[in-house]
Image (cartoon, grey):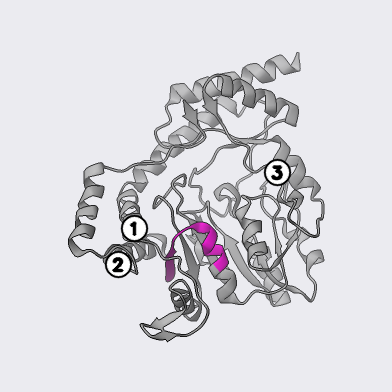
């Protein structure tokens, strides 16, 4: 069975060494020494000043909204994982969709300005599949209109933009450390703030709003990363270069096999940013062809995934809907092929041959 992703598991003995430390000091959570070590190493590795570890990437977005004081409407993309939209709704904010660029698949800055109104408080772009948004234009629009910017950077671990970490842009960026990601802590996430004030406030919010054992400063919640999660993160971080090398080999082998197929489209990368090879999305000529390819792959024990489908502007719990034609079109035709560091070249060749066979048969 070949699934769309395969969680990386580091050396069991190394992880057991951290578990032994946890048992020895009996400090399981509440900013323990292992979580502190991971935060320090990530701060240095990613080149950021203020990184806060949390229990998952979804709550990372929610905390960022709270800390930045977002209200009213937030302009965002309809082409993302559902958490990008659901976190806004959960926090009582109204998602205001702007359509995507059909080549980069990211929020199109040319569609943002027309959505801004007196109720708009922020822009929430997504670096889709690790591909950097048009950060310069988005930041310029935000500055001109006095708006906050929160980047959903769930896919962009270890990506640089114009020579520095992509996480250093905007008022905040959020990461997901879910087990399916390039870097993971089993479950987990992080928030990167540019402001030390925001960072310090967030540290209290994720610990019930406490500023001392008996001092409840403001409304908070509990979403801290525990020591077992942090231990996994330290182990995975040690192996990250090996993981990235394996993913790049897989990515390059897909390109070698599929790049000459005229009926396939590929995401256009931002030339100002690096890649981390987290995903391999392919856009087919039609949804009909996609469904045939998916069915044939499934019949051969291969499970790609329709990231991202459906387009989020169609969610049934949204009170006000605006149809986004580009996002809806792309979401019906895009399929993420299996991608992980240990994926073998012969398996990629088999996947590509199945795709070529379906497309060839469909064109007859």
Q: Residues within 10 Å of mark 1 (few under 14, many from 20)?
A: many
SS at mark 1 in the image: helix
Against 311, residue 161 (above or below) is below
CA–CA distance between discs 2 and 1? Answer: 9 Å
Q: Is residue 295 left or right of residue 187?
A: right
Closer to the camera in the image, 360 or 64: 64
In terms of image quadrants, where is residue 258?
top right
Asked if the residue under mark 1 is in contact with the one under mark 2, i.e. CB atoms within 8 Å, the reply is yes
Q: Which residue is mark 1?
A: 230
CA–CA distance between discs 2 and 3? Answer: 40 Å
Closer to the camera in the image, 49 or 261: 49
The numbered disc on residue 310 is: 3
Q: Is residue 54 magenta?
A: yes
Whole-percent x and y of residue 7? Answer: 41, 41
Whole-percent x and y of residue 31? Answer: 34, 69
- The magenta stretch is 48-62
């Amino acid at each position: 069975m070949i699934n769309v992703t395969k969680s990386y598991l580091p050396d069991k003995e190394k992880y057991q060494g951290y578990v032994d430390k946890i048992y020895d000091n009996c400090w399981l959570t509440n900013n323990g020494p292992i979580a502190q070590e991971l935060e320090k190493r990530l701060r240095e590795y990613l080149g950021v000043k203020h990184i806060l570890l949390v229990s998952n990437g979804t709550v990372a977005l929610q905390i960022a909204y709270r800390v930045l004081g977002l209200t009213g409407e937030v302009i965002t993309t309809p082409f993302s994982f559902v958490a990008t939209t659901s976190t806004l709704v959960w926090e009582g904010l109204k998602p205001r969709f702007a359509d995507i660029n059909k080549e980069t698949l990211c929020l199109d800055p040319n569609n943002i300005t027309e959505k801004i109104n007196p109720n708009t408080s922020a822009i929430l772009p997504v670096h889709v599949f690790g591909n950097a948004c048009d950060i310069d234009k988005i930041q310029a629009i935000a500055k001109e209109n006095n708006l906050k910017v929160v980047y959903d950077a769930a896919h962009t671990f270890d990506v640089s933009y114009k020579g520095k970490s992509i996480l250093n842009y905007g008022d905040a960026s959020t990461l997901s450390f879910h087990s399916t990601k390039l870097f993971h802590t089993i479950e987990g996430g992080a928030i990167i703030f540019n402001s030390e004030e925001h960072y310090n406030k967030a540290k209290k919010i994720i610990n019930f709003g406490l500023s001392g054992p008996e001092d409840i400063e403001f409304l908070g919640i509990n979403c801290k990363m525990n020591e077992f999660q942090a231990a996994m993160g330290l182990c995975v971080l040690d192996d990250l270069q090996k993981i990235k090398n394996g993913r790049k080999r897989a990515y390059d082998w897909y390109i070698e096999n599929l790049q000459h197929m005229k009926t396939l489209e590929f995401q256009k990368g931002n030339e100002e940013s690096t890649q981390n090879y987290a995903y391999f999305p392919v856009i087919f000529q039609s949804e009909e062809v996609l469904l045939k390819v998916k069915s044939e792959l499934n019949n051969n024990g291969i499970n790609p995934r329709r990231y991202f489908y459906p387009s989020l502007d169609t969610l049934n719990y949204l009170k006000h809907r605006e149809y986004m034609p580009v996002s809806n079109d792309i979401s019906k035709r895009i399929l993420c092929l299996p991608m992980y560091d240990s994926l073998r070249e012969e398996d990629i060749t088999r996947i590509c041959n199945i795709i070529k066979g379906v497309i060839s048969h469909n064109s007859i």
